Amino acid sequence: MEKRTGNDGYLILDGGMGTMLQSAGLAGGQRPETLSVTEAEKITAIHRAYLDAGAQVVYTNTFGANGLKAEGCGYSVQELVTASVRAARAAAPTGSARVALDIGPLGELLEPVGTLSFEEAYELFAEMVRPGAAAGADLVVIETMTDLYEVKAAVLAAKENCALPVWVSMTFEESGRTFTGCSVEAMAATLEGLGADAVGINCSLGPVEILPIAKRLCAATNLPVFIKPNAGLPDPESGSYDITPEQFCAQMEPYLELGVFALGGCCGTTPEYIRRLAALCGGRVPAARQPVEASVVCTPTLVQQVEGLTVVGERINPTGKKLFKQALLDGNMDYILTQALSQKEAGAQILDVNVGLPGIDEPAMMEQVVKSLQTVSDLPLQLDSSDPEALRRGLRVYNGKPIVNSVNGEQKVLDAVLPLCKKYGAAVVGLTLDGNGIPMKAEQRFAVAEKIVSACEAAGIPRRDIYIDCLTLTASAQQKEVAETLAAIRMVKERLGVRTVLGVSNISFGLPNRELLNHSFLTMAAAAGLDLAIINPNVTSMMDAVRAADVLLARDKKAGRYLVAYANAAPAPLAAAKREMTIEDAIYRGFKAEARQCTQELLLKMGELRLVNERLIPALDAVGAEFEAGKLFLPQLLQAASAAQAAFEVVKLSIASKGRPPVSKGKILVATVKGDIHDIGKNIVKVILENYGYDVIDLGRDVAAERVVKTAQEQGIRLVGLSALMTTTLASMEQTIRLLREAAVDCRVFVGGAVLTPGYAKRIGADYYAKDAKQAVDIAKEVLG
Amino acid sequence: MKLALDAPLDRAEICRYLGCTPADLDGAARALIEECEREILHAAAPRCVFRRFGLQWQAETPRLAGASQALEGRDIARHLGGCHAVLLMASTLGAGVDALLRAAAAGDVARSVVLDAAASVAAETAAATAEEAAAAALCRAGEYRTGRFSPGYGDLPITGQRAWVALLDAPRAIGLAATREAILTPRKSVTALVGVADHPVRGRLAGCDCCALKEKCELRKRGTPCGKADGQ
């Protein structure tokens, strides 16, 4: 934390470095950071000019001194950083003004938009932090960031590789979001959790445009806030900025009302701007700020304030789900992603993620599932595991502020998990049980809750980030204890001032019409003060109960959300108007609902295998033949494939419900190779192969060769399909094939992609070239039957 | 700067990406295209950045004034023949479109493919708008310009994306970067050069000879190459 007393005045930060380099005629073709080595005294002179103008903190000339941007500049990262810190230190001897090790964006985008991994980003930042701290920087400032994930990598790299304070400022558009969609509130919640010492806004806009965003930041965090605006907006032709030092100073005056602790300038500002700013702030003390009490969890683009009943989707959990278990064993992310998207559509606001299953590496799976989920969904996650290592791996790669589910009153659990929550800035669920099991009485559960809350506070986790679970028992076995749960919720809310959470469905175990008991209990718990309801949002009556409770408890003001949900809803049809058609018609015309219905009806008359072989595949063949003949086109072919997929899902569920092994013609592994993110062709091939009864394990895009080899070995894969779109990524395809051969994996390889040709496929060692999905099916038939 | 992108997109062009014409499609497929177009336009936050550079010629080889490397290849030199300056531009639909496409890829494949095609057309439309904005801001009276030329056209290496992105400070200006494999991220983005001359120029866009797709291009087989070539 920035240690300052109430009597401290403003801290004045420096102004633009690039601007000064340009005016000194130093901004030629080379990287500006190399000037710290070649023209060190001139860099020192720039810092001195800012100090003379009244700055108390100078940023080192290291904005782009990372391993990606500095590659080929003739100096190592260590040389650039060390020389730059020394150049600043020469102007600001220790004890006079502070030297901030400046860390800017890496210049490449992180996964999932780009291909740079979180772990690579971490290493690149750590490579700057170590020499920066060693050379005598006083603090680390991570600035001009637009991607919260990159910020998290940088913050962890700073905190794990030095003991200096860490400040972070990001760059916003006038909407209050960055280019990547990160909101200022998401930044605040995530960085306060990660233990940043101060947060701020810099660059892109001038003081006038940043002011409303700065207000939002101050309202969203308890951390000290600093602001470094540009000298107005740039002229598109000349690139010069449009406000004078006098105007800048006048426009900075309103910031003195906000309670920010430090002010400076960014692009276009010079010592003259800083001199006037220092004069403006001289003798004044930052205004006091209102403490922030809200409970929030977030991803970069979605901040979920927990205020009233908030729905946590429970479906990402293998317990009692055969298809889910199989998906985990196969490492098949698609199934899990589908669960996430359908829960989101049904109204889930947070997703619980549990991937614990005997026989899998839970920590590795948690990391993989968290990374995969955040590529397709913007809902905050609740990481659910009893394995601290699985929690740690998931927390490390999570982008935003999550919840950990869970700790309980056992000291060793608290000791193992709370430090993780603190370090990674997670909220935490506390179960009111301990080594002696679940206490029967509300008072006893309250006592456990009290212990958990005090352990959290001792670990540095504030009450607003604590969610106490008073535990649902089954009404069939422990009917009287239902009331104890509700009483405990009230006590916890009133006496401890923390939030509450409950898994609801357990209430009805062992009784018929479970839905009725579930949503009735949910309503009672809501009245008692429940905040997070862990439910299946795909069950209509549960979401109905949530919306009703929000109206009745006056949390849905003027019943706005309720009206949106129900005012214009047509009365539900008794049954969807059924179009009379055969399964062949339904597939040909791409009607998913009808394909499902026809399949259900046919399964009454014929077995799954016969249905697949005698009806579904011939129907697809017919569509494929018309496509080949130019009578049908890609959109229709794919709509047919989607309808067939819907039919297959019915078949798979039918087989799973009978406890029989799945129908499969064999497993095929598909991947878009390392470095390439164009996966649309691979996705088409996957769906068509699945249509023909093959199990497709899709490793996704930008897949390392080693992962293909490892999965092929573990799963006994006999056919591998690889795709690449770019000439620049064909080398990865070649390398993947070579590694498969070197590892002596007994498999055939087919390849496809826009720039591939049969000749090239042969040259890089592929067994087959597939020009389209139809050929991929022919290859699969040949290899797997 | 921000760009406006208005409905409707060129639906015939979306169909071309999907290997058909609007007349080939039934009502359900047409409805899907319209729905996907709406979703893309909603998710898009199109932006562009541009800069004018003098063009220095060393014999037949052009170089952007102040850039460390010359422009590589025969095709870009032919395209810029007679030009004394260039407009370097980049445009992107933004990260929101990528997020939409990623989520769609986990669901219905037909929707996913049509969304991708609609996004490609939107990216082309944004690039055309950006080109006009660049010309309005940076071309003087009496100047003429060529069409756009991008890395990967003809024999201009795709690896040039990285240098152009850096020259434009595109990561900071519009959130656009290039990967080490020279893929633009966010994906639905364009970088291009437009030649500027003081007399009418048409440019010579690369023909099929150097195209990475020439061996299998359906358009070329049908004798209707992609329309970007100007027939010279």
Image: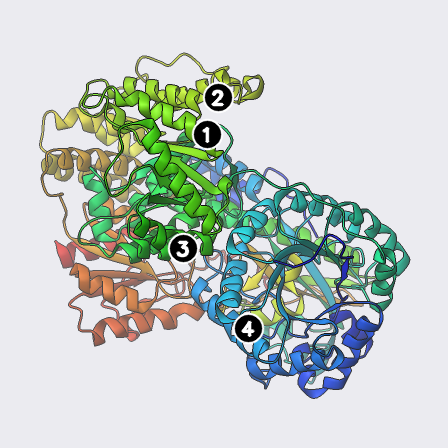
Lower sequence index among marks 3 and 1 = 3
Number of residues whose C-alpha sits closer than 10 Å to that of mark 1, classed few (under 14), some (14–19) or many (20 or more): some
Residue in front for this viewpoint, B61 or A719: A719
Q: Is residue A675 left or right of residue A131?
A: left
Where residue A406 sits in the image (x, y, percent)? 34, 44
| Residue located beneath label 3 in the image | A420
Q: Nearer the viewer, mark 1 or mark 2?
A: 1
Q: Nearer the viewer, mark 3 or mark 4?
A: 3
User: Residue A77's quadrant in the figure?
Assistant: bottom right
Q: Amino acid at mark 3?
A: Leu
Lower sequence index among marks 1 and 4 = 4
| CA separation in Å, label 2 and label 3 | 33 Å
Number of residues whose C-alpha sits closer than 10 Å to that of mark 2, classed few (under 14), some (14–19) or many (20 or more): many
Lower sequence index among marks 1 and 2 = 1
Lower sequence index among marks 2 and 3 = 3
Q: Which mark is residue A550?
A: 2
Residue in front for this viewpoint, B162 or B32: B162
